[in-house]
Amino acid sequence: MGSGILDGVNVGAFPGIHFNPEEYTSLILNHGSGAEYRRSVTCPCARIETRQAAMGCKFCRGLGLLYPEDLRGPTIVLDSSRSATNKWAAAGVLPSGTIQVSFPIGVIPAIGDMLLPDEEVHVVEETLWRDDRAVDGNVVRLDRARMVPGRDDPVPQRAAVERLLYPDTTEIERVTYIDEARDAMVAARPADYRVAADGTFTWAAGRGPEPGKAYTVRYRAPAAYIVHSSAPVFRQEASTGMPYKATLGRLDRLSADDLR
């Protein structure tokens, strides 16, 4: 046999080579991308009869998560993997979007935290419904209330809130609905509706679809990703803590159960 480059060399005599967390963080800071990082807390609006977030909550917008101003701040993350695939499902094409990022030392992400990468924009399409419940003092009549196991009297339900999912909407590209009376597809004009700072969608009097009917909204907003399906990964080498790594999903690709 020919002689090898390590023939006669005691590899065990070489000093150990270890990863340096500070060098890893330096790599993230030098080659990563800026973002706003928002830590989450669970909203205490949960309804006693369902243990679910209240859909009409003005604080969490029915998501069950809050992002207080004092838990927000700029950061830099290293984007190591992206997925923007579509797959066919029973209801049609189901798009998904995930990213994997590494955080600098000192940032410990948690389920529910939100990341908004700088300069990235998501085009979002949502379907909303005009509320069709008769409301008196913001509470529906008892004949439309819902019975709850263990209670003899029905629990009144509050009116649904029509609200866009993403925070900080920057542009409404199109609002579409069907005019039942004219049997026509209609593109609403900006004067026909108003979008509040919290994303609440309100139609002008006499405008929009009939109560109980759907309408679609295509809009732009700063890209938002949520730490959701799996807990962030703690990594260490030679008993030394390394930067955390997490998988995040596009906000509009997550279900209500993912967010609560």
Image (cartoon, rainbow, N blue to C red):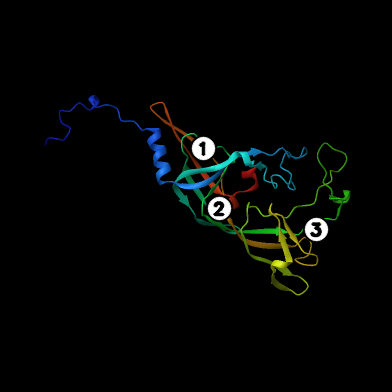
- The residue that mark 1 highlights is 232
Amino acid type for the residue under numbered disc 1: Pro
SS class, disc 3: loop
Measured as percent of width and height from the top left, residue 66 is found at: 66, 42
Amino acid type for the residue under numbered disc 3: Asp
Measured as percent of width and height from the top left, residue 165 is found at: 65, 52
SS class, disc 1: loop
Which numbered disc, 1 or 3, marks the residue that appears first in the sequence? Answer: 3
The CA distance from mark 3 to mark 2 is 32 Å
The CA distance from mark 1 to mark 2 is 20 Å
Which numbered disc, 1 or 2, marks the residue that appears first in the sequence? Answer: 2
Which numbered disc, 3 or 2, marks the residue that appears first in the sequence? Answer: 3
User: Is 163 above or below relative to 229?
Assistant: below
In this view, the residue in front, 173 or 129, is 173
Amino acid type for the residue under numbered disc 2: Ala
| Mark 3 Cα shell of 10 Å, populated few (<14), some (14-19), many (≥20) | few
State the count of labels: 3
- Quadrant of res 199: bottom right
The CA distance from mark 1 to mark 3 is 41 Å
User: Is 206 above or below relative to 68?
Assistant: below
Measured as percent of width and height from the top left, residue 169 is found at: 63, 56
Horizontal side of residue 99 vs 125, given as left or right: left
Which mark is nearer the camera, 1 or 2?
Answer: 2
Please give the label number shown on residue 132.
3
Let me know if residue 131 appears in the view: yes
